[in-house]
Image: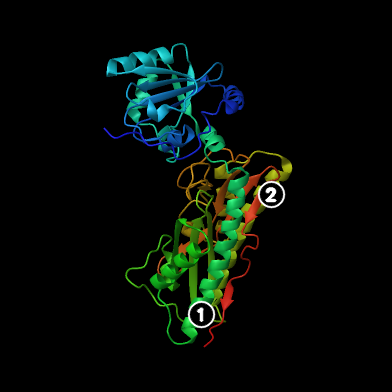
Amino acid sequence: MNAPEPPALTPRLTNPAELIALQSELAQMGVDGWLLYDFRDQNPLAHHLLGLGKTTRRAFAYFPAQGDPILLRHAIEASAWRHWPWEARVYRGWDDLTAGLETLLHGVGVVAMESSPGGDVPTVDRVPAGALEGVQKTGTRVVSSGDLVTRYHSSWGPEGRASHLRASKVVRETVHAAFHHAALAAGEGRPVGEAALMDWIRGRLRERGLREQVDCSVATGRNASDPHYHPEGPGALLAEETLVLIDLWGAEPGGIPADQTWMAWLGESPDDRTLQVYDAVRGARDGALDFLRERARSGKEVRGFEVDRVARDLLAREGLDRWFAHRLGHSIDRELHGSGPNLDDLETRDVRKILVDTGFSVEPGVYIPGEIGVRSEVNVYWGPDGPEVTPDRIQEELLRIPLRG
């Protein structure tokens, strides 16, 4: 047996000071409690929220809307749960676990768990079917804990927001430097390849203090029509009169990542088709941001799928919506692709509410195979007064980077 590791993250739900606010939220949801299940980190959301170290046995942590939380854990897992401040019930065999779960949920009508009907929201759908069946056999109904995950797992906090702002500035400055680096190399007759520029970008991001979740994608010309393009070998050369897409991201240690996509023309004379598609994508991005601002001014709640629909409809007016093959945006928390609401009415219909102190990307794109690919990506922090867009200076026009020797 391996000794349990100490928890790497400060737990939120095991802080008694959080309990009153959590129980108020549970009452507003109309559920009897929040039941968190984990086994070998199958549910990383529970692992983070409970501040767990290494675990090897099944456990249920129940947070009722009234009364103190109760833990049901295995007899050998005491160290992994050393930070649990309330009652802990112990089981040894499978029959103990079954009986213990029935006792724990006796009289409980509805609990929230990390599940998603139909698997519609995969980032929340973390509890195995067998564990759900075990809960349902007690007579307790299960609903999704999606909004609780947003509130307690995906919120940024003041330092998270500050770290994102710093990362955003580094990302913006790095992508501009990368375009000019490529233009200088092309102008001197030694054009850089896509893979080499990606290595250059990663190095620059790390030099500027972004040491976690650092990566990028560089796609030139028709290669950008593949939304998740990655070059084979050295990739294509970045030559004169070429459209270039750079998507790059990274975070400070323990911080909130920044994730941006910029477009540039190496040269001075982009063709009319490129400008048409770029303007349509920028218009979809700005339309989505305007929708968010209007919802904030009106005080109305906003759900992820609604924002996606705005951008998709704007591209439809230009006859380009069929080439917008992914969701409008993804949640950003401590992970680049976080567990909060996505802006999505395509891959899923994400009906979760966007809550204060959370963030996400806005990144419409048009990808016409073999012809052109354009994406514009910014990030949004949803604060008390509405959307705060990063970087501080977002891309308006298609960048034109003249070659110079």
Q: Front-most of 326 and 91?
A: 91
Q: Which residue is mark 1?
A: 183
Decide: is 246 above or below 305.
below
**Picture residue at 53% right of the left edge, 50% below the top:** 255
Residue 240 appears in the rendering: no
**Picture residue at 40% right of the left edge, 75% below the top:** 193
Identify the element where label 1 is drawn: helix
Relative image position of residue 205 (x, y in whole percent): 50, 63
Q: Front-most of 352 and 70?
A: 70
Residue 196 appears in the rendering: yes
Q: Which residue is mark 2?
A: 293
Relative image position of residue 221 (x, y in whole percent): 44, 73
The scheme the figure's colours follow is: rainbow
| Amino acid type at mark 1 | Ala
Quadrant for the N terminus in the image:
top left
| Amino acid type at mark 2 | Arg
Tell me if label 1 and label 2 are in contact, CB under 8 Å.
no
Q: CA distance from mark 1 to mark 2?
A: 37 Å
Decide: is 157 above or below 34.
below
First in sequence: mark 1 or mark 2?
Answer: 1
Q: Would residue 298 appear left or right of 85 to someone viewing this image? A: right
Decide: is 292 above or below 188.
above
Decide: is 194 above or below 71.
below
- The residue carrying pointer 2 sits among few (fewer than 14), some (14 to 19) or many (20 or more) residues within 10 Å by Cα, namely some
- The residue carrying pointer 1 sits among few (fewer than 14), some (14 to 19) or many (20 or more) residues within 10 Å by Cα, namely many
Q: Front-most of 298 and 43?
A: 43
**Picture residue at 40% right of the left edge, 69% below the top:** 370
